[in-house]
Amino acid sequence: MAAKKAAPPIAKAIKPKIRHFLDLSDFDSSTLRKMIDNAHAMKAAGRRVPVAMRPEGIEDKVLLMVFEKPSTRTRISFDLAMRQLGGQSLAPLNASDLQLGRGETVADTARVLSRYGDVIMLRANSHEKLLDLAANSRVPVINGLTDLSHPCQLMADILTFEENKGKIAGSTVAWVGDGNNVATSWIHAAVRFGFKLRLGVPPQLNPPAAVLEWARAEGGKVELTDDPDAAVRGADCVVTDTWVSMGQTDTSRRKQLLGPYSVDKGLLRLASKDAIFLHDLPAYRGHEVSAEVIDGPQSRVWDEAENRLHAQKAILAWCLGKD
Ligand code: CP
Ligand code: NVA
């Protein structure tokens, strides 16, 4: 008698079709390029995304957002992005108000939320939770920041760079400061968008070795130094971020290590004459950046914050099936 064939696990049968947006490293370059081109076009079109650029049936689709950490930009720009795309969005949910905060598993939460909404954005304390949510969701999951990465921020940053300086491929970007979650997404972006990234980071706060190894294996132009001057010299764009990310407690150690990595006028002067300055915000003037830099003529941080909205319209459209 022939052995009974085991039924394929349902999750595996569904998963490949789901358009999660978890990390830039998961994508091929042309898919990301198309998303950025769509983001440029959506921004140019204004507050209503043209019907031709909207996913089919968008008017009946609902975005759910869950936050384990605070947010200003991400929660507001995702809500507005979904509305401007023609869809609907439920008020952002704080994880502490959900049963998730009392021990319901991420997997069960995913199973339930994905019966209600059509796309889920999660800001999570740990990247594992994001992956767990995606593995158990029937609908696309978007990474709205984890301890490991912040890919939506990078889509906005690429958009901002290109508005000011043309295509980013072949350019040089300097990251100065903590080798944190945003730095990891810059590394992913450098590889996928084909630009050179020089990281000036204290060795104690380097980005994860696995991320650097991934970039090397992919043939990316990612260089690491502990010298902020060397990182910035001749760069087309200088980027930094807070010294103390959400959830980190070793504040005084970080401030001590990162003191020499503050982006001030003297450091920015080493970059190319028309270099732009970016910061994902929130910013702490007098720490990672001086007021005269972030509030100065080379800063593009307010455009960058606005561009979260436009980049996320393109991300949501892709997740909901639009090519
Ligand atoms: N840059 C960013 O993600 O900001 P919020 O933490 O305010 O969402
Ligand atoms: N690295 C920062 C980014 C905030 C948007 C953090 O994780 O707190």
Image (spheres, grey):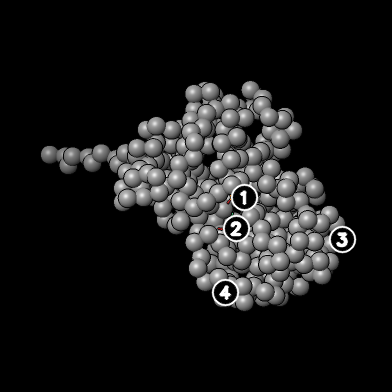
Reading the chain from its start, which is encountered first: label 4 or label 2? 2
User: For mark 1, what is the residue?
Assistant: 153
Residue sitting at 81 percent across and 56 percent down? Answer: 296
Is 34 rendered above or below residue 197? above
Q: Residue 2, percent across and down?
A: 16, 39
User: For mark 4, what is the residue?
Assistant: 252
Reading the chain from its start, which is encountered first: label 2 or label 3? 2
Residue sitting at 56 percent across and 36 percent down? Answer: 79
Reading the chain from its start, which is encountered first: label 3 or label 4? 4
Question: Regarding mark 1 in the picture, which secondary structure is present there?
Answer: helix
- Image check: 62 left or right of 7? right
Q: Nearer the viewer, residue 36 or 95?
A: 95
**Separation of residues labelled 1 and 3 (CA atoms):** 25 Å
User: For mark 3, what is the residue?
Assistant: 273
Residue sitting at 67 percent across and 36 percent down? Answer: 38
Question: Which residue is the extreme one toward the left?
Answer: 1
* CB of mark 1 near ligand 1 (< 8 Å): yes
Question: Which residue is the extreme one toward the right?
Answer: 273
Reading the chain from its start, which is encountered first: label 4 or label 1? 1
Q: Residue 148, percent across and down?
A: 51, 59
Q: Nearer the viewer, residue 13 or 53?
A: 53
User: For mark 2, what is the residue?
Assistant: 182
Q: Are marks 2 and 1 in contact (CB under 8 Å)?
A: yes
Question: Regarding mark 3 in the picture, which secondary structure is present there?
Answer: loop
Evaluate whether residue 35 shows in this view: no
Q: Amino acid at mark 3?
A: Lys
**Separation of residues labelled 4 and 1 (CA atoms):** 27 Å
Q: Amino acid at mark 1?
A: Gln
